[in-house]
Image (tube, rainbow, N blue to C red):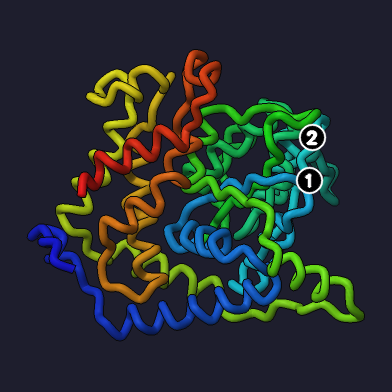
């Protein structure tokens, strides 16, 4: 890659070719193990691994029956993470996720409160059908996702490391769902769209999953291996041209400051600084997953949609005209890479 690395980045870049090759090979084995169970969804598996490598959370969106839950379970097994699952329902309360204090009586007759941890105290939390719970319950994850700790009754409790939320969501148009708050959407590093498999993949699925024995995933990594890989991601140097492309892409998506007519006309609100941070981490993770020492502009373009689509909203006029966020993001890609 011909991008120039800034002096400050070069001073902090302590990445060896051996480290990159070792982690890349390890992740390749993990990816192959996941794809032996999750058939026909290579892009989905890659984006999920990018999310975890970057230390973030992912929002998995698709209609029922596309193996969203199976994907999260398989990721936990293959990566050696302690996982817990919460089925989000309309009557779910914040305490059902975070935990609560219960009153107990000691042998001496004195009463005291004991904190009982909820399922959020895990390394990989599967928030299944997250948009079936009320906004109040959804917001219980805000502090956990951002600060990796929760506050109960005035006391702060640290979450295990690493900590990731992989939430599955049914399309908003389906019965009995609630839209996620914008503040929570912004905390998801990527939105991973899961579509129907193609013909050959669906043929594999029906053969592999209806026999006497299904393929079971094997543990390939440990949580310490994953944290070491996450640390390596943050050490990868990023060229000035890639940083410029990230800034152009994100800043051009804001209707208040953009020079693009389509964005001013179609976008109600655009991506904030978290989008730039997410892209910076995600392009590094994608490069490491591919065994490269530094990301390129191609990584920025490839990850523009999963990073931006849940951090933007169309105006009423744009929706009435049949526009989509995909149209807007394609226009932003042109700005980031005019060539």
Is residue 112 visible to us here? no
Residue 280 rendering spot, x and y as whole percentages:
31, 52
Question: Most extreme residue toward the right, as rendered?
Answer: 212
Residue 74 rendering spot, x and y as whole percentages:
68, 68
| Residue plotted at (48% across, 76% down) | 27
| Residue plotted at (74% across, 65% down) | 202
Kindly state the secondary structure of the residue where label 1 is placed. strand
Kindly state the secondary structure of the residue where label 2 is placed. loop
Would you place residue 319 above or below residue 113 in this image? above
Using a 10 Å C-alpha cutoff, classify the residue at mark 2 as few (fewer than 14 neighbours), some (14 to 19) or many (20 or more).
some
Residue 35 location, quadrant:
bottom right
Pick whichever, 261 or 174, lies toward us.
261
Would you place residue 20 above or below residue 303 in this image? below
Pick whichever, 10 or 261, lies toward us.
261
Would you place residue 12 above or below residue 211 in this image? above
Residue 97 rendering spot, x and y as whole percentages:
71, 42
| Residue plotted at (61% across, 30% down) | 180
In the rendered structure, are the residues bearing label 2 and label 1 in contact, judged by CB atoms less than 8 Å apart?
A: yes
Question: Most extreme residue toward the left, as rendered?
Answer: 7
Q: CA distance from mark 2 to mark 1?
A: 9 Å
Which of the two marks, 2 or 1, is nearer to us in this view? Answer: 1
- Classify the position of the N terminus by image quarter: bottom left
Would you place residue 84 above or below residue 21 in this image? above
Q: Which mark is residue 87?
A: 1
Instruction: Say left or right for 58 vs 336.
Output: right
Is residue 95 visible to us here? yes
The residue indicated by pointer 2 is 92
Using a 10 Å C-alpha cutoff, classify the residue at mark 1 as few (fewer than 14 neighbours), some (14 to 19) or many (20 or more).
some
């Amino acid at each position: 890659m011909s991008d120039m690395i800034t002096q400050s980045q070069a001073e902090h870049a302590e990445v060896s070719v051996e480290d990159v090759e070792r982690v890349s090979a390890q992740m390749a084995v993990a990816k192959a193990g996941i794809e032996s169970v999750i058939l026909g969804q290579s892009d989905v598996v890659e984006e999920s691994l990018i999310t975890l490598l970057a230390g973030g959370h992912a929002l998995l969106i698709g209609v029922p029956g596309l193996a969203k839950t199976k994907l999260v379970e398989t990721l936990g097994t293959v990566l050696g993470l302690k996982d817990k699952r919460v089925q989000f329902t309309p009557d779910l309360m914040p305490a059902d996720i975070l935990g609560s204090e219960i009153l107990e009586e000691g042998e001496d007759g004195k009463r005291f409160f004991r904190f009982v941890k909820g399922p959020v105290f895990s390394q990989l939390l599967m928030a299944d059908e997250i948009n079936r719970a009320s906004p109040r319950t959804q917001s219980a994850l805000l502090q956990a996702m951002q600060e990796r700790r929760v506050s109960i009754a005035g006391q702060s409790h640290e979450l295990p490391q690493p900590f990731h939320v992989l939430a599955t969501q049914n399309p908003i148009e389906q019965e009995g769902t609630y839209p996620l708050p914008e503040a929570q959407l912004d905390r998801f590093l990527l939105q991973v769209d899961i579509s129907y498999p193609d013909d050959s993949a669906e043929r594999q699925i029906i053969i592999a999953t209806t026999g006497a024995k299904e393929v079971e995933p094997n543990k390939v990594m440990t949580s310490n291996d994953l944290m070491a890989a996450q640390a390596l991601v943050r050490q990868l140097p990023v060229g000035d041209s890639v940083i410029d492309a990230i800034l152009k892409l994100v800043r051009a998506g804001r209707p208040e400051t953009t020079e693009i007519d389509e964005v001013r006309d179609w976008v109600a609100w655009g991506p904030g600084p978290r989008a730039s941070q997410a892209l910076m981490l995600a392009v590094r993770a994608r490069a490491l997953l591919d065994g490269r020492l530094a990301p390129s502009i191609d990584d920025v373009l490839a990850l523009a949609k999963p990073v931006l689509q849940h951090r933007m909203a169309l105006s009423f006029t744009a929706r009435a005209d049949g526009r989509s966020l995909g149209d807007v993001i394609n226009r932003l890609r042109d700005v980031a890479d005019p060539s």
